[in-house]
Amino acid sequence: MGFSMQPYGIQSMLKEGHQHISGLSEAVLKNIDACKQLSAITRTSLGPNGMNKMVINHLDKLFVTNDAATIVNELEVQHPAAKILVLAGKAQQEEIGDGANLAISFAGEILQSADELIRMGLHPSEIISGYNKAIIKAIEILSELVEPGSENMDVRNKEQVIRRMKAAVASKQFGQEDILCNLIADACIQVCPKNPVNFNVDNIRVAKLVGGGLINSSIVRGMVLKGDTVGTIKRVEKEKVVVFAGGVDTSATETKGTVLIHSAEQLENYAKTEEAKVEELIKAVADSGAKVIVSGAAVGEMALHFCERYKYISFWPFSSLCPLPLLSILISDILACRLMVLKISSKFELRRFCRTTGAIAILKLSPPSPDDLGHVDSISVEEIGGARVTIVRNEEGGNSVCTVVLRGSTDSILDDLERAVDDGVNTYKAMCRDSRIVPGGAATEIELAKRLREFSFKETGLDQYAIAKFAESFEMIPKTLAENAGLNAMEIISSLYAEHASGNTKVGIDLEEGVLKDVSTTNVWDLYVTKFFALKYAADAACTVLRVDQIIMAKPAGGPRRDAAPAPGGMDED
């Protein structure tokens, strides 16, 4: 009989297969190490000269980008502590739409400082206490660094918009920010509502068309739909629109039935009844004044036939009797009566189309009322870079959607340009809420580091060490910007400290020339809210990680893993 030892302690409490990690060296320091690894990935992508990452996700989709939010989303981080940093980055992305890299990189840097403090002998609770004091003081200093007069801004002034947007766009597409900022600012100003606080980022759409270059990009006041119209009508101008959400086709009956037909005449009448119903509906649409039918689902062949031909047929027998001038007028009238048919499969695109035209989507096939109809200035099918697109323009008021048409040589470049546009649009939304700006080019971070270090000297107790390390962590921003641009980081940081010590609080790094300049001359400004939330989320995430002293993981649930290879000899084999 074998002797089996009974489990004791936490082993006896939890199921077999669990994991339990505790203690400073096992739990806290390993958590910090995981967060440092994550921030090391995103840090090299910080700033205008940030390097791109090539990420291939679990679906084998390739991403080539320096956008931290996309990188951490597609990495599928498994470590529970590193996931907290990912959540901080996501919170920043949802709140502002920019600055996710700053939040993740700064959180990793202050955790690196905490690692050094723990090895010096400080307890995590003392570090957390110091960090909390430091972030409160940092936010207080940040509000003092706001540019005077920047709180009053006209969000429809293109020059002021570009001034605030330039840094955010340049961090994604350095060297092309002037072209992009012009496009984004024009698009945002066109759809900005009377109360700018209600600005909706969904009203700015992006159409990516391969071919050409960024210089060929443009904006369309309306929508750009990939694909052709269903019928032969390719252009209409200043017409009414009707939208059917459920498609334009004869619907099948809900119950099955059998029809007994005795003669050819009965068969003909049976088919004619269906035709008559469809013709009646199309005639009702034409009589309502609508010349464009937009369908959310399939368009039946019979419905399309009547859209294109029903009036044409009725006039044709008389054409041989008409004199030529009258015939030409008659034919032009006939062609004007024909209906354009457009199919939009996506329900989200259909909603945006309704917003653009002011139409109300009709759920079932029925004659439309005048209130249901929308209006378009023009709908035309054009060929751009080998792709046929339907352009819906609505430039005379009532329009709330604008599309940025991006051109580029590859899909990866277009995806990255789209992210830059998203950042610019989100920055516009943020400036509609709070237009205050602070100096960019690492000028704000160095001033925060300088003032926080002075603040730490006034503190008594062990908190001062944590505050001093928190202040030192701000040096990560100018250091990373300089390293990514291939400059001497230590020389740049010492020069920045010297300039700020002599009272030049707006001096930052000019990455184009690799020298220090006053940011008011280079026009590099960051939004106050972007910095505020990035620092706040980074400090909160770091304190959350430091508060953890034990990790207890239950046994993973059973079942095959998603990435597990199929068993040899299984049914999946050919």
Image: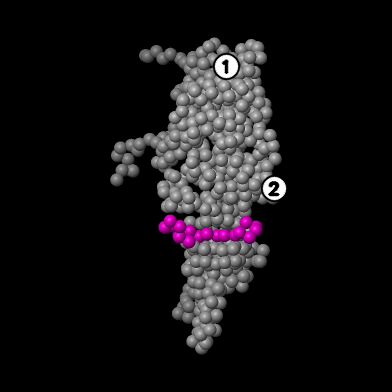
Sequence-wise, the earlier of marks 2 and 1 is 1
- Name which residue lies at 56% across and 20% down: 472
Looking at the rendered structure, the kind of residue marked 2 is Asn
Q: Residues within 10 Å of mark 1 (few under 14, many from 20)?
A: many
Q: Residue 115 magenta-drawn?
A: no
Q: Is residue 175 positioned above or below 300 on the image?
A: above
Q: Is residue 59 visible?
A: no
Q: Which residues are magenta?
A: 382-399
Residue at image mark 2: 195
Looking at the rendered structure, the kind of residue marked 1 is Pro
Residue projecting furthest to the bottom: 321
Q: Is residue 149 visible?
A: yes
| Element carrying mark 1 | helix
Residue 542 image-quadrant placement: top right
- Name which residue lies at 60% across and 66% down: 238
- Name which residue lies at 61% across and 18% down: 453
- Residue 416's x, y, as percent? 47, 43
Report the quarter where the N terminus lies: top left
Report the quarter where the C terminus lies: top left
- Residue 409's x, y, as percent? 41, 49
Q: Is residue 570 positioned above or below 517 on the image?
A: below
Residue 12 or residue 40, whichever sits in front:
40
Residue 566 or residue 484, whichever sits in front:
484
Q: Is residue 516 positioned above or below 392 on the image?
A: above
- Residue 289's x, y, as percent? 62, 70
Q: Residues within 10 Å of mark 2 (few under 14, many from 20)?
A: few
**114 lies left or right of 211:** right
Q: Residue 387 magenta-drawn?
A: yes
Residue at image mark 1: 124
